[in-house]
Image: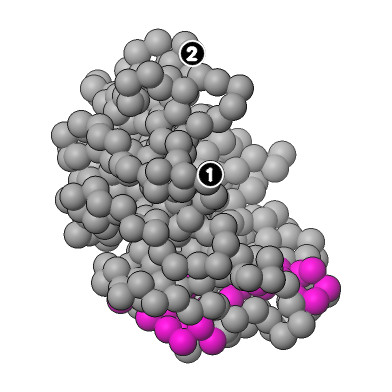
Amino acid sequence: MLSSLKKPLIVGTLLAAAALGLPGVATAATAGPVDLGTLPGDTFSRVTAINAAGTMVGESYPRDVRMRFHPVKWDKHGRISALPTLGGEQGSAIAVNDIGVAVGWAFDVHEEVHAVRWAPDGTVTALPGAGSSSANVISRTGVIAGSSVTAQGTPVSVRWAADGSVTELAALPGGGQTHVTGITGDGALISGQAWDSAGNDHAVRWNATGAITDLSPGNQGNPGATAAAINDFGVIAGTVTEAGRQVPVAWKRDGRQVRLDWPASPASATPRAINNAGVVVGSGDVDFAENRAVRWSAGGVTVLEPARRSEAVALNASGTVVGNVESVAARWAADGTETILGALPGGQYSWATGINPEGTIIGMSDLSYGWHAVYWPAS
């Protein structure tokens, strides 16, 4: 595989770059991704999260008309092992914290689904809840958040403390469902979305008691606001809707909303991730509604890939960004240098979906018969 190396262009030069074409592109060899494989008897796999130590979690599943997901984890060397369920056939590991505690969902012997926690040694514990539930995020301190169903059958978002006690996260007054999108490292704040009585979605934040703060109260009558990600300082990146387009914003811990510049307005731009330095990455629409990978920082907005369809989806503390360019995984260094990461032998496509502090990247790549979880070791 070949890697493309080039510097980003500030968005103010985007149209000029499109008119003049790309500057000269240097190339360098890359080893491509490492195939994380599947459990015996399965055909496909997906990696959902990686921690600072390089432990990865996800799912493995067979080629079958009846999807049967099996929870798995991989060590830092890419060796796969099955995670136990609650006696049922299926499950999935969704997140893992830095001490190796993973969370997700699993079936019991009655084929009912429960939010679960796996200890570093793989021991599985069902989290308390009245009905079907799933754990979606976990903090450094072991606080977990996800979804559940009340005894009356109402879907709700919940917070499980490190001791397992459960707190229902409040909905908007007169509102309906809620959805968790992130959690701070100490577990004190949770980001998410909540729907009002008119069916409009709002960006919201919950504290440790489950109390809700509407970050977009002026959204009434608009079709949506999103809280995509939260950092350890409680800063949330997301969007509000104005005149039918998504406007990128950040909410400070005190609730103040700050607009993230997008000079290609009236086109939309969408944040996807934020690190503890407050750097935000995502994608923005340009000509012909094509996305471009974007980074917002104290220095302004930078289009990381000015000429091709692309998106940025994650970044680490050092500012390394990952995403994809024309459906192939890509990495951007803190200085904006782009590296195309390639696909598995015989494959054409790949996606980078996460990166840990050491620079190990997770994602997926196609094969002639489907998709496998992959990782790119830190360089």
- Which of these two is toward me, 91 or 246? 91
Pinpoint residue 325: horizontal percent, then vertical percent. 48, 34
User: From the viewer's perspective, is 176 left or right of 4?
Assistant: right
Tell whether 370 sits left or right of 2: right
- Which residue is painted at 39% across and 67% down in the image? 144
Kindly report which numbered mark, 2 or 1, lies closer to the viewer in this rendering.
1
Amino acid type shown at disc 2: Tyr
The quadrant of the rendering that contains the N terminus is top left
Tell me if residue 72 can be seen. yes
Q: Residue at x 67, y 56 (%)?
A: 268
Q: Residue at x 39, y 59 (%)?
A: 126
Q: How is the image coloured?
A: one colour
Task: Report the front residue among 180 and 214.
Answer: 180
Residue type at mark 1 is Glu
User: In the image, residue 379 lies at what x, y percent?
Assistant: 18, 37
Question: Magenta stretch containing residue 189, yes or no?
Answer: yes
The disc placed on residue 111 is 1
- The answer to whether one can see residue 276 in this image is no
The image position of residue 136, as x and y in percent, is 45, 58
- Count residues near mark 2 (Cα–Cα under 10 Å), then give few for <14, some for 14-19, many for 20+: few
Instruction: Say which quarter of the image contains residue 84.
Output: top left
Q: Is residue 74 above or below residue 200?
A: above
Helix, strand, or loop for circle 1?
A: loop
Q: Is 288 positioned to the left or the right of 73 in the image?
A: right
Residue topped by disc 2: 369
Marks 2 and 1, how far apart at CA: 29 Å
Numbered range of the magenta stretch: 184-211
Asked if residue 94 is positioned above or below residue 374 in the image, the reply reads below
